[in-house]
Image (cartoon, grey):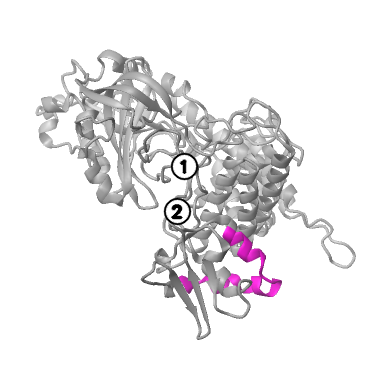
């Protein structure tokens, strides 16, 4: 069972061990209604008084007569109720015990032992988005700067990606999606759940319905009212979903809970957009499962499975630093097989930034290969008895044997296919959602700087303006500094290998650059770099650029800012409405329905051709403000589910519309 410390209860909460979700949910459920109202106040600051004893237990004192003691198991996680005890008279149904458990980090669910004969290397490229782990539990920590966040779920029940007036759909509790619909973002890495290929069981449908109800209540409450009691209801429903065999739904719920915690603690790592995406993924997954309509990867998988890959010959492409929000750091080296298949070898361990910076030259722990990651990125391997995950990660089981071989320059051998077609064509061929975008290569000419981006244009005739953005924004990593040097040489032509950012218009996050063969004004790299510079580890110097500055004549002047159809569209108004609902709950959306703002929102959307978005936004605000009462002022319909369906329809349509605009920006 892995530990997630991205959500903590205070400055001293790092001393508190992680707690299994079901233990916390049970503790909160056992409280009386009076004590539940006091729980959020009791959680605040209680972790600051945590003290670790010599035997490894952690104690938190409440006054003179009550001490809560946590005794985690060998894994360092509190997995049983009797591992958390309190000395007061009300224990175990006391406020003190529930408060300490509520201030502790939430542990990831326990995973079964890997089937490989030897331990697999921890990787930093789990498909994640946000502060928690990705759906489909993995052995890797959630990477925040090692891999792109998940692309967002597929259009939810009843929603479409069309922008015309007739493209909207009215969601409802019985809304379903086609069985072949794409699974949402951060799926289980292509692994199929137990119910894949057939109908869901009755237990799975019931568990999904319970999770949907808990998620709807949490959405209606928002961050402001989403305290420990609301979180515990989600955790209880998430645990039930796991027992029923729905690990993806459970992981989505854990991500929402961690996001709520971070937002309520005002954590610097929390982003409202990420929490909004987590709610969208949870509601989408639970809603489809509750309807009994499974899709590919919808149930998820408990862990990645490594399968036999036989004998492989792979060549290095580049290295990429990996950082996670949970203090892990390392490197991922991207490889290419002779058949064009993509692979990677990762080395991610606790250590954070220092580990990420030093791991670029660390030895490769794969089948006894005498090679470091710097050498592998420019060399190759012959692997016998390889084990490969569905995402292409090479395992390091005891039966694996690897031998170093010579590398190939970009554009030679199997790498030639990476640079053989326009970037727009390569992006169009990538999956719309559900998987991390693959690497693509292109030859570009530098136009100039635009903020922290570098504006370039592909050498292909009629290509659009592209933006090169830092793959890792951390100032201690050289990505941004290298891009600033490149931006200072307008007219320079270079070969770029990177990952497209499918959340931004025509944006490529380069991992490595190199000279364009035969170009007069291109990079001049040392021979031992084999024609490439890893932007996360190698630092470009003045000697690496053409000495004849006069020859660098840009073909066009740099605009103040390139055209961005996503930023220029009025969809930001819908995004702000959805995020306001996540932050302030249903009441905040209802307040937005009053005054002149709804009319202005609808008018702006319709003028731009987003008629469906206008209709769905209007339906959301109307549903949020619908609170029917009887003659005595009592609510006649207190359910939050219709509001959750309206919010999900607007959120799914927004995600689909934004994806369409981003795709068009590459054409």
User: Dot 1 corresponds to which residue?
Assistant: 128
Kindly identify which residue carries mark 2.
Answer: 4
Q: Nearer the viewer, residue 83 or 627?
A: 83
The reply to whether dot 1 and dot 2 touch (C-beta < 8 Å) is no
For the residue pair 287 and 489, the one nearer the viewer reads as 287
Query: Residue 464: horizontal and vertical position, in percent?
Result: 39, 24
Out of 479 and 445, give the one closest to the viewer. Answer: 479
Can residue 357 be seen at all in this image of the molecule? yes
Which tag is nearer the camera, tag 1 or tag 2?
2
Crowdedness near tag 1: few (<14), some (14–19) or many (≥20) residues, C-alpha within 10 Å? many
> What is the span of residues highlighted in magenta in the rendered image?
23-47
Q: Which mark is residue 442?
A: none
Asked if the stretch drawn in magenta spans residue 44, the answer is yes
262 part of magenta stretch: no
Secondary structure predominantly adopted by residues drawn in magenta = helix
Residue 118 placement, left or right of 87 = left
């Amino acid at each position: 069972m892995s530990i997630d410390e991205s959500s903590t209860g205070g400055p001293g909460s790092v001393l508190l061990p992680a707690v299994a979700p079901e233990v916390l949910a049970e503790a909160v459920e056992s409280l009386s209604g009076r004590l539940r109202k006091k729980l959020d106040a009791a959680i605040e600051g209680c972790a600051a008084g945590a003290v670790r004893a010599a035997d490894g237990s952690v104690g938190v004192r409440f006054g003179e007569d009550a001490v809560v003691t946590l005794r985690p198991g060998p894994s360092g996680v509190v997995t049983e109720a009797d591992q958390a005890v309190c000395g007061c008279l009300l224990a175990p149904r006391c406020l003190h015990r529930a408060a300490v458990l509520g201030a502790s980090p939430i542990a990831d669910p326990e995973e079964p032992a890997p089937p490989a004969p030897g331990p697999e290397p921890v990787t930093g490229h789990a498909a994640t988005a946000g502060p928690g782990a990705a759906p489909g539990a993995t052995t890797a920590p959630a990477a925040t700067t090692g891999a792109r966040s998940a692309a967002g779920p597929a259009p939810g029940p009843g929603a479409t990606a069309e922008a015309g007036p007739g493209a909207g759909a009215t969601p409802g509790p019985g809304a379903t999606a086609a069985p072949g619909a794409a699974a949402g973002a951060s799926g289980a890495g292509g692994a199929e759940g137990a119910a894949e290929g057939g109908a869901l069981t009755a237990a799975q449908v019931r568990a999904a319905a319970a999770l949907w109800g808990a998620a709807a209540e949490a959405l209606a409450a928002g961050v402001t009212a989403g305290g420990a009691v609301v979180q515990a209801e989600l955790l209880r429903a998430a645990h039930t979903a796991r027992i029923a065999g729905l690990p993806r739904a459970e992981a989505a719920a854990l991500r929402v809970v961690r996001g709520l915690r971070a937002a309520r603690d005002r954590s610097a790592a929390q982003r409202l957009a990420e929490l909004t995406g987590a709610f969208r993924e949870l509601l989408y997954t639970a809603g489809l499962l509750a309807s009994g309509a499974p899709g590919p990867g919808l149930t998820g998988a408990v862990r990645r499975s490594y399968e036999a890959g036989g004998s492989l010959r792979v060549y290095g492409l580049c290295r990429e630093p990996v950082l996670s929000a949970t203090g892990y750091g390392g490197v991922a080296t991207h490889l290419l097989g002779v058949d064009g298949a993509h692979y990677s070898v990762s080395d991610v361990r606790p250590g954070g930034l220092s580990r990420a910076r030093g791991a670029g030259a660390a030895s490769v722990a794969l089948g006894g290969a005498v090679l470091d990651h710097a050498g592998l990125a420019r060399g190759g391997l012959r692997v016998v008895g390889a084990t490969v995950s569905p995402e292409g990660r090479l395992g390091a089981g005891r039966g694996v044997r690897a031998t170093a071989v010579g590398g190939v320059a970009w554009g030679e051998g199997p790498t030639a296919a990476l640079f053989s077609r326009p970037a727009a064509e390569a992006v169009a061929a990538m999956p719309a959602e559900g998987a991390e975008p693959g690497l693509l290569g292109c030859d570009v000419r530098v136009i100039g700087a635009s903020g922290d981006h570098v504006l370039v244009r592909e050498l292909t005739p009629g290509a659009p303006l592209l933006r090169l953005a830092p793959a890792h924004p951390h100032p201690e990593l050289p990505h941004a500094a290298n891009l600033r040097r490149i931006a200072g040489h307008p007219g320079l032509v270079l070969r770029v290998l990177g990952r497209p950012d499918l959340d931004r218009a025509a944006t490529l996050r380069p991992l490595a650059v190199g000279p364009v063969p035969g170009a007069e004004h291109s990079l001049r790299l040392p021979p031992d770099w084999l024609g490439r510079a890893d932007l996360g580890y190698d630092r470009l110097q003045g000697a690496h650029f053409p000495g004849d500055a006069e020859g660098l004549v840009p073909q066009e002047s740099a605009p103040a800012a390139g055209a961005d159809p996503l930023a220029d569209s009025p969809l930001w108004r819908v995004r702000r409405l959805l995020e306001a609902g996540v932050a302030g709950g249903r009441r905040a959306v209802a307040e937005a329905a009053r005054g002149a703002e709804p009319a202005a929102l609808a008018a702006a959307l319709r003028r731009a051709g987003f008629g469906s978005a206008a209709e769905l936004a209007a339906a959301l605000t109307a549903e949020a403000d619908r609170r029917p009462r009887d003659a005595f002022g009592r609510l006649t319909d207190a359910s939050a589910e219709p509001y959750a369906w309206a919010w999900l329809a607007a959120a799914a349509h927004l995600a689909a519309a934004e994806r369409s605009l981003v795709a068009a920006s590459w054409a």
